[in-house]
Image (cartoon, rainbow, N blue to C red):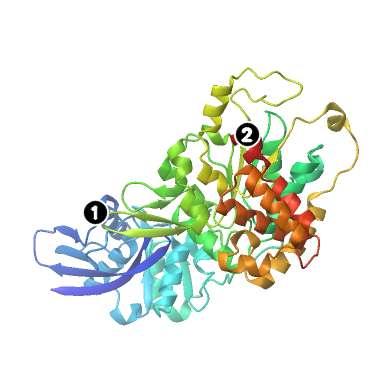
């Protein structure tokens, strides 16, 4: 009887958990049994392992094989256990010594010829390995740059099973990958500039305020007025990812399998624009088996753009409440509860009515009042309360479209946004996420501001949440003007951005 143990990891949510891979060889009829709650992909690994060992010249033991993935009460999913299981079999055969694998974690999918294919969640696994005090991590070559971001861990990105055996038996000749988190400075790689947007000065100002304070935004206007064009340029106003933000964002995309091969940290803030046919699970995460991150998590530290907002299913929009309020999504299953980060800026766009021309001075609206109310009723009051800025985007006039006048570019607006954000960083958080206990401290109003806000709350029937969001907006506008105190003009502009509560929904 020969018993050998290797170490691997399983990813749940965006966190990885250490898994012991125990291999036992014993006389028998050459059975290959895998236990420890393996899914179909893990059970099928026996065929890949047999072919890999044979094609790499190691052969397969003329014995029965039992592999236990411990702890046994955690469900194991994916093909990333192929490599530690294969190395465990080689160790039980005497090809690899146990001391060579001390402090080492193995993960990777095997092809039939012994090649290593990339796996999901390599960055999460690297973080787990470092937290568990392991010294080395062996991953497929395509995952090397991603995993090497973690400092204090020797990461070896290898191409096939033969290289793995050679490396673990001669660590002194192996050179780990070095890629310790270099972030690029901001560049307008997509080439989207606000200079290309004709007219829409009010909407541009609203986008600048939203970017400065990390506020959620809703644009409403007729078709072709430039709502999507504005939304796609908003991403250029946001500051570059910090190192910690890049780590978090990359982990989510890696777990979802969206990270390009041989890519390290994500360099740009994500911009996600799901179609309105997206399901609840597609939007907030879930699915069969181990839950996967949804669009709100893939937009973590970036932008989530929902075009044609009323066309999204009502239940899908309602599940946005938790991530908008808490910055995280909690998914509960009978066997586990997982949490995904989802701190994003929501940017939504919609028409004022089904035909799109309600309130337009140049086109006649064909919708009756009940049809318009039914259309707008798809967006609930609680969801609307969580959107800080509502701005109308009217049709662009002909003279504005044909004007050759130079408008402000993204770089100039971005400079003002960054100055306002630096002021907020000194307070500890951006204004949109200012805790309730700090609102009175940082958002005091003078007598004139109090009167304006009281009148707005009474006339527009605003909720307590909308009241707080107006104060946060006013704080952002004051920061943009370089004012330490909130003046009445700042409150008045903040109230203006809630005008859709009065114009459409009341």
Q: Image point 77% across, 48% down: which residue?
A: 205
Q: Would residue 247 be found to the left or right of residue 427 on screen?
A: left
Q: Is residue 200 left or right of residue 275?
A: right
Quadrant in the picture for residue 241:
bottom right
Residue situated in front as seen by the camera: 501 or 314: 501
Could you say where residue 280 lies in the image, as x and y percent from the top left?
Answer: 42, 42
How far from the left and from the top, in percent, is residue 161?
37, 63
Mark 2 closeness class: few <14, some 14–19, many ≥20 residues within 10 Å: few
Q: Quadrant of the C terminus?
A: top right
> Could you tell me if residue 259 is visible in this image?
no
Q: Nearer the viewer, residue 35 or 61?
A: 35
Q: Which residue is mark 2?
A: 504
Q: Which quarter of the rendered picture does the N terminus lie within?
A: bottom left
In this picture, is 478 found above or below 171? above
Q: Nearer the viewer, mark 1 or mark 2?
A: 2
* Residue 1 appears in view: yes
Q: Name the element at disc 2.
A: helix
Number of numbered labels in the structure image: 2
Seen at 44% across and 46% down, the residue is 319
Relative to 216, say whether 131 is above or below. Answer: below
Q: State if disc 2 and disc 1 touch (CB < 8 Å).
A: no
Horizontal placement of 404 versus 187: left or right? right
- Pinpoint residue 392: horizontal percent, then vertical percent: 70, 37
Q: Position of residue 7 (x, y in %)?
A: 32, 71
* Point 30% across, 75% down: residue: 96
Mark positioned earlier in the residue sequence (1 or 2): 1
Residue 199 location, quadrant? top right
Nearer to me, 154 or 365: 365
Tell me how far mark 1 sits from mark 2, CA to CA: 57 Å
Q: Secondary structure at mark 1?
A: helix
Work out whether residue 186 or residue 350 is closer to the camera in this orientation and state it: 350
- Residue labelled with disc 1: 43
């Amino acid at each position: 009887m020969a018993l050998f143990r290797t170490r691997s990891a399983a990813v749940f949510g965006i966190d990885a958990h250490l898994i012991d891979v125990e291999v036992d060889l014993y006389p028998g009829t050459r059975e290959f049994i895998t236990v420890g709650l393996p899914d179909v992909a893990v059970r099928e690994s026996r065929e890949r392992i047999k072919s890999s060992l044979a094609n790499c010249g190691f052969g397969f033991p003329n014995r029965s094989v039992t592999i236990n993935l411990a702890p046994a009460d955690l469900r194991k999913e994916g093909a990333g256990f192929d490599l530690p299981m294969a190395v465990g079999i080689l160790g039980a055969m005497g090809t690899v010594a146990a001391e060579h694998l001390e402090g080492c974690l193995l993960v990777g999918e095997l092809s039939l010829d012994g090649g290593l294919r990339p796996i999901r969640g390599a960055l999460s696994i690297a973080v787990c390995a470092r937290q568990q005090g392991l010294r080395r991590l062996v991953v497929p070559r395509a995952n090397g740059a991603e995993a090497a971001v973690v400092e204090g861990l020797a990461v070896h990105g290898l191409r096939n099973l033969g290289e793995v055996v050679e490396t673990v038996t001669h660590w002194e000749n192996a050179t780990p990958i070095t890629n310790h988190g270099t972030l690029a400075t901001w560049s307008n790689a997509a080439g989207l500039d606000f200079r290309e947007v004709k007219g829409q000065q009010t909407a541009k100002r609203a986008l600048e305020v939203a970017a400065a304070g990390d506020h959620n935004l809703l644009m409403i206007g007729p078709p072709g007025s430039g709502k999507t064009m504005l939304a796609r340029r908003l991403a250029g106003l946001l500051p570059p990812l910090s190192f910690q933000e890049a780590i978090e964002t990359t982990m989510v995309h890696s777990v979802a399998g969206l990270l390009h091969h041989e890519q390290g940290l994500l360099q740009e803030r994500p911009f996600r624009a799901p179609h309105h046919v997206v399901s609840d699970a597609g939007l907030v995460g879930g699915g069969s088996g181990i839950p996967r991150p949804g669009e709100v998590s893939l937009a973590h530290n970036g932008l989530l753009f929902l075009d044609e907002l009323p066309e999204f299913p009502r239940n899908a929009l309602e599940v946005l409440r938790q991530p908008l309020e808490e910055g995280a999504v909690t998914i509960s299953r009978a066997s586990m509860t997982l949490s995904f980060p989802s701190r994003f800026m929501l940017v939504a766009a919609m028409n004022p009515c089904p035909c799109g021309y309600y309130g337009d001075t140049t086109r006649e609206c064909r919708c009756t009042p009940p049809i318009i109310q039914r259309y707008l009723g798809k967006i609930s009051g609680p969801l609307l309360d969580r959107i800080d800025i509502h701005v109308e985007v009217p049709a662009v006039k002909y003279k504005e479209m044909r004007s050759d006048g130079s408008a402000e570019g993204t770089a100039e607006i971005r400079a003002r946004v960054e100055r306002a954000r630096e002021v907020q960083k000194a307070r500890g958080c951006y204004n949109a996420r200012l805790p309730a206990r700090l609102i009175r401290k940082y958002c005091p109003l003078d007598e004139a501001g109090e009167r304006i806000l009281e009148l707005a709350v009474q006339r527009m029937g605003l909720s307590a949440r909308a009241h707080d969001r107006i104060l946060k907006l006013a704080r952002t506008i004051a920061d943009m003007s370089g004012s330490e105190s909130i003046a009445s003009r700042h409150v008045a502009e903040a109230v203006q951005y809630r005008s859709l509560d009065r114009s459409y929904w009341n």
